[in-house]
Image (cartoon, helix red, strand yellow):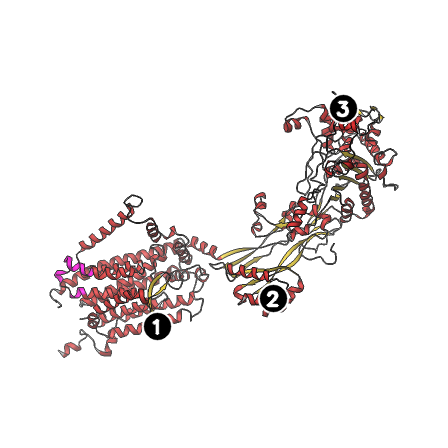
């Protein structure tokens, strides 16, 4: 079959073709080498970087949150170590058996076990799945002792925020909670810590407002991971930096006293040091337990808080704004004196009302006060005196004086939702309501009604300024990490001292002289006397018909339509040290509902007064260390 | 006559054949395989029993088979070429009935001591059958259309069977390998020009018709073809492999990150790190230098095949030698192109380096043929 004829020709052809083929193959090999060079040598840098990115993961080490203390070094917020138990499926072997064994030493339910098993089945084998949290040390010790029988079980340390003063400081401290998408959208904060699931951030109060210093700085753990994310080893570690410790100006004893004194009322009380603006107490009632929020508040509890008409969640001291009522009369009086529209001894006749363009503006006393000078108008809180004076002074001067005394202006406090209140002007009404200012508005404003609004905190500032004669501003944070925060507003008020004297004298009379509206609430101790002013602000319009029939008594009205009761004061009258404001929402008359509370709190403040200097924070108290023996 | 028979120019007999082995080729094969052992040891993280040891054992067995085959005269292998081809076809036909399914494709037959991929065996079967055919065929008929059609059928038939497994990569390699043998056997170049032209026209036509009312394929088929050609269009599938593979190669640099220091492979970013993608580990740990050395070894193996073929006056032996060399070439060229992102991801192992018995055994059997042709070449 084989035909050896012309083998040479065929071989030649084969050789030729094979050489062509070999040439092409050599070309391909060359191209492969070239591509190899391109990838490995030329693009080496970028590929090496990519390999590094593949390999190295950065894990954050959450810092321990800073502690908060009162002025005496009493802890208001600290962190308690807490343990949770986790299980790793692939280490456990038979997870269900291990969990059953665990159940004999730790209180876990069948539900917990079922949940953990289900979660494990959804995750990769090396992922730690939580079994139970909030275990105490004894249980953890038992688990550790039984570790050999519990493969795959590990205890993980975390921290819980504890508010030892509970309800007393709920509004000041606020609380922490897990960061939410809403928080992220609200805050201009690119701290990577916020991306940790369930990372705790301040949700309210001080916790929210000085979140950044309290939070501290994240530590970083560089770990090598493989393609499915399993941790292979730790490459490096940079410890986290605990948050700053914060000292407030509040005195926890006075705060507690004030909170208790407000009791079940829907009320607020603010005590301020007139010399430096330190807020010593800032109570808002009713209150709540912030610890409940940290641990995850139950739906029922939250519903209770949310639907309570007394609004326990609201910090009424700074967020509640009320018509100041007669406590505003000092403003109108000083505005009149300053502008020279009225002299201290000039008299106005009060016949129970002022008539203006067919409309009657009533004094609270139907029969009128007779002839009133400045002193008596404040002492007896005559409305007509101010109606008359206001027509001369005008709203712009009143508004300017209100702002000078701290009403209707912002005060910078480390709290959320600090309201500015309102010292209305003609321009404000035009812009806001689109209507022209009418003289009736001025009359209403002159007695702290109508558009005028202020918060209890602002009223305490007003009292402090009247008592000290300076533009002192409130201060809530004394120091952050022992760095003192500045005192603001030591400069004198832009008011003639004798005008202030006249008002101070009248405020003394309100409390301490016969016929003063707060006569029943004087502190009868030499050198501790208060100077103050009552206020009762209407929240409803009293019609002509009702006036004719007789004004309905507060007690006969539904709660939310009763008058607000207010009282502002400073003490001691001859050497002012503290100012106070008390607002009892819908409490009725200021002299009956607010003044006695203010007296008691002021008395407590004066009693504690000798002992409320600052205690430096012990330097070794770092965030996270449990403070034993000094809780609550 | 006896003088002539004992002359070095005559074919050796008996044990003295050992002296006439193509030892440099055997050495090169061992060098490449050893690189493989090293890499398998590295990707297993220092666990020699996992991949390196079985691979060494299989290589030794394969070398034994190769040496045995080298002792058998090439004429014997020529005579059984047809049988080898028919057995290969039979095995391919049997795969759907007795084959194992792995990864969605039915390609393996379990022989007890090893699993065999008949499609691998068929590459050699086609080479042998075509070499036999062209050794037998009268020179004048080589380019006659009828005598061109026969080898085309011999190639297309197994290719279609492999395609049905489905294994497009191997099917294409069988066709390419067969075509190369027809080329070196001397089939007129116009046939090849015509084939290339018509394939180009067909491909152009298929893609040009896309989106028109005369569309030749279904939409998902186009999508599949596109993914095949351009893996980056499927970043989580084969695109992921290519990306990670290039990262590994690229991060190696000139001299690599050191033996067992590659992070890509150790941390499992590389898919199929011990089989089809083992070259990336070599690149990562020994860098450009390591890659070029292996490529050089492959090139030398190919070169020795050509040298052996050129010195062989036996047409069957020469064609088989070049055919085996070319098959070998396709293995490493396609595999390397794949891991370097130059070719679509097809399941082609890096010859003698990738973990796996089937491909290694088939290759060493093939080189057994080359050795036999070399030892028994008429001089």
Front residue of A79 and B66: A79
Q: Are marks 1 and 2 on the same chain?
A: no
Q: Are marks 3 and 1 on the same chain?
A: no
Residue B142 is one of the magenta-drawn residues: yes
Task: Name the spot of residue A259 as percent of width and height, x first.
Answer: 76, 46
| Left or right: B43 as drawn, with respect to A145 | left
Q: Is residue A410 visible?
A: yes
Task: Name the spot of residue A435 as percent of width and height, x first.
Answer: 65, 25
Task: Name the spot of residue A405 as percent of width and height, x first.
Answer: 74, 33
How many residues crowd mark 1 within 10 Å: few (<14), some (14–19), many (20+)? Answer: few
Front residue of A492 and B164: B164
Q: Residue furthest front?
A: A549
Task: Name the spot of residue B14 as percent of width and height, x first.
Answer: 22, 78
> Which labelled disc corresponds to residue A417?
none
**Segment tinted magenta in the rendering:** B133-151
Q: Is residue A397 above or below residue B96?
A: above
| Left or right: B365 as drawn, with respect to A503 | left
Q: Are marks 2 and 3 on the same chain?
A: yes
Residue under circle 2? Answer: A102
Q: Is residue A13 above or below residue B235?
A: below
- Circle 1 marks a residue in which chain? B
Between the residue at mark 2 and the residue at mark 3, the CA separation in whole angstroms equals 79 Å
- Circle 3 marks a residue in which chain? A
Residue under circle 3? Answer: A360
- Circle 2 marks a residue in which chain? A
């Amino acid at each position: 079959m084989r035909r050896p004829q012309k083998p040479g020709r065929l071989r030649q052809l084969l050789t030729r073709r094979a050489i062509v083929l070999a040439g092409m193959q050599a070309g391909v090999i060359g191209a492969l080498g070239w591509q190899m060079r391109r990838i490995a040598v030329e693009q080496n840098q970028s590929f090496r970087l990519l390999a590094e990115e593949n390999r190295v993961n950065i894990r954050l080490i959450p810092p321990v949150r800073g502690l908060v203390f009162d002025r005496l070094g009493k802890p208001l917020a600290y962190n308690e170590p807490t343990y949770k138990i986790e299980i790793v499926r692939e280490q456990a072997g038979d997870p269900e058996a291990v969990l059953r064994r665990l159940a004999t030493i730790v209180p876990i339910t069948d539900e917990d076990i079922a949940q953990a098993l289900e979660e494990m089945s959804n995750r990769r084998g090396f992922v730690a799945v939580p079994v139970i949290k909030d275990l105490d040390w004894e249980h953890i010790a038992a688990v550790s002792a039984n570790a050999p029988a519990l493969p795959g079980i590990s205890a993980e340390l975390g921290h819980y925020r504890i508010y030892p003063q509970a309800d007393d400081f709920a509004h000041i401290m606020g609380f922490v909670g897990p960061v939410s998408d809403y928080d992220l959208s609200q805050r201009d904060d690119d701290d990577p810590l916020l991306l940790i699931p369930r990372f705790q951030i301040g949700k309210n109060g001080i916790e929210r407002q000085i979140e950044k210093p309290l939070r501290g700085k994240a530590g970083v753990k560089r770990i090598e991971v493989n393609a499915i994310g399993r941790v292979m080893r730790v490459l490096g570690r940079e410890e986290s930096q605990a948050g700053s410790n914060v000292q407030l100006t509040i005195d926890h004893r006075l705060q507690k006293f004030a909170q208790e004194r407000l009791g079940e009322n829907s009320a607020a009380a603010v005590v301020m040091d007139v010399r430096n603006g330190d807020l010593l107490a800032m109570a808002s009632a009713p209150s709540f337990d912030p610890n409940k929020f940290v641990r995850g508040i139950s739906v029922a509890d939250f519903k209770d808080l949310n639907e309570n008409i007394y609004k326990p969640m609201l910090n009424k001291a700074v967020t509640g704004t009320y018509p100041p009522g007669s406590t505003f009369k000092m403003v109108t009086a000083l505005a009149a004196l300053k502008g020279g529209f009225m002299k201290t001894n000039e008299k106005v006749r009060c016949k129970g009302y002022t008539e203006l363009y067919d409309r009657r503006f009533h004094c609270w006393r139907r029969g009128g006060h007779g002839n009133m000078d400045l002193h008596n108008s404040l002492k007896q809180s005559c409305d007509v005196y101010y109606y008359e004076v206001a027509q001369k002074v005008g709203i712009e001067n009143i508004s300017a004086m209100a702002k000078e005394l701290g009403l209707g202006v912002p005060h910078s406090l480390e709290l959320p939702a600090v309201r500015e209140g309102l010292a209305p002007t003609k321009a404000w009404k035009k812009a806001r309501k689109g209507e022209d200012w009418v003289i009736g508005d001025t009359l209403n404003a002159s007695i702290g009604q109508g558009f005028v609004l202020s918060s209890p905190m602002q009223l305490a500032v007003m009292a402090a300024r009247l008592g000290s004669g300076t533009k002192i501003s409130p201060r809530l944070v004394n120091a952050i990490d022992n760095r003192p925060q500045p005192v603001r507003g030591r400069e004198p008020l832009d008011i003639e001292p004798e005008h202030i004297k006249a008002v101070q004298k009248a405020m003394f009379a309100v409390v301490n002289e016969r016929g003063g509206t707060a006569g029943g609430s004087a502190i009868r101790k030499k050198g501790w006397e208060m100077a103050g002013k009552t206020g009762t602000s209407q929240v409803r319009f009293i019609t002509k018909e009702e006036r004719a029939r007789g004004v309905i008594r507060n007690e006969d009205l539904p709660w939310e339509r009763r008058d607000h009761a207010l009282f502002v004061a400073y003490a001691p009258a001859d050497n002012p040290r503290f100012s106070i404001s008390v607002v009892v929402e819908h409490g009725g008359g200021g002299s009956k509902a607010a003044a006695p509370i203010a007296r008691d709190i002021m008395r407590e403040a004066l009693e504690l007064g000798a002992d409320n200097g600052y205690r430096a924070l012990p330097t070794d108290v770092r965030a996270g260390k449990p403070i034993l023996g000094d809780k609550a | 006559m006896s003088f002539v028979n004992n002359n070095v120019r005559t074919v050796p007999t008996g044990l003295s054949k050992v002296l006439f082995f193509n030892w440099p080729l055997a050495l090169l094969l061992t060098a490449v395989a050893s690189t493989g052992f090293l890499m398998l040891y590295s990707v297993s993280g220092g666990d020699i029993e996992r991949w390196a040891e079985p691979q060494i054992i299989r290589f030794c067995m394969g070398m034994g088979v190769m040496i045995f085959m080298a002792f058998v005269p090439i004429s014997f292998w020529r005579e059984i070429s047809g049988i080898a081809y028919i057995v290969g076809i039979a095995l391919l036909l049997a795969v759907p009935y007795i084959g194992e399914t792995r990864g969605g494709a039915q390609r393996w037959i379990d022989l007890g001591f090893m699993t065999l991929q008949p499609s691998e065996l068929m590459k050699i079967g086609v080479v042998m059958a075509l070499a036999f055919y062209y050794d037998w065929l009268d020179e004048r008929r080589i380019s006659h259309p009828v005598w061109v059609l026969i080898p085309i059928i011999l190639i297309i038939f197994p290719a279609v069977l492999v395609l049905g497994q489905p294994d497009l990569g191997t099917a294409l390699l069988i066709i390419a390998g067969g075509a190369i043998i027809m080329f070196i056997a001397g089939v007129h170049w116009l046939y090849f020009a015509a084939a290339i032209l018509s394939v180009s026209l067909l491909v152009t036509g298929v893609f040009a018709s896309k989106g028109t009312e005369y569309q030749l394929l279904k939409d998902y088929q186009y999508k599949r073809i596109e993914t095949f050609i351009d893996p980056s269009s499927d970043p989580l599938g084969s695109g992921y492999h290519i990306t990670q593979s290039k990262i590994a190669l690229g991060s190696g640099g000139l001299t690599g990150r050191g033996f067992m220091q590659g992070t890509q492979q150790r941390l499992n970013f590389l898919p199929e790190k011990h089989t089809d993608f083992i070259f990336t580990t070599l690149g990562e740990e020994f860098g450009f230098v390591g890659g070029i050395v292996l490529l050089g070894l492959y090139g030398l193996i190919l070169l020795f095949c050509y040298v052996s073929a050129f010195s062989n006056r036996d047409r069957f032996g020469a064609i088989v030698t070049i055919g085996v060399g070319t098959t070998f070439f396709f293995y490493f060229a396609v595999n390397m192109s794949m891991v370097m992102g130059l070719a679509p991801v097809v399941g082609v192992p890096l010859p003698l380096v990738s973990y796996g018995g089937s491909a290694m055994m088939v290759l060493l059997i093939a080189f057994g043929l080359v050795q036999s042709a070399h030892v028994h070449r008429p001089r």
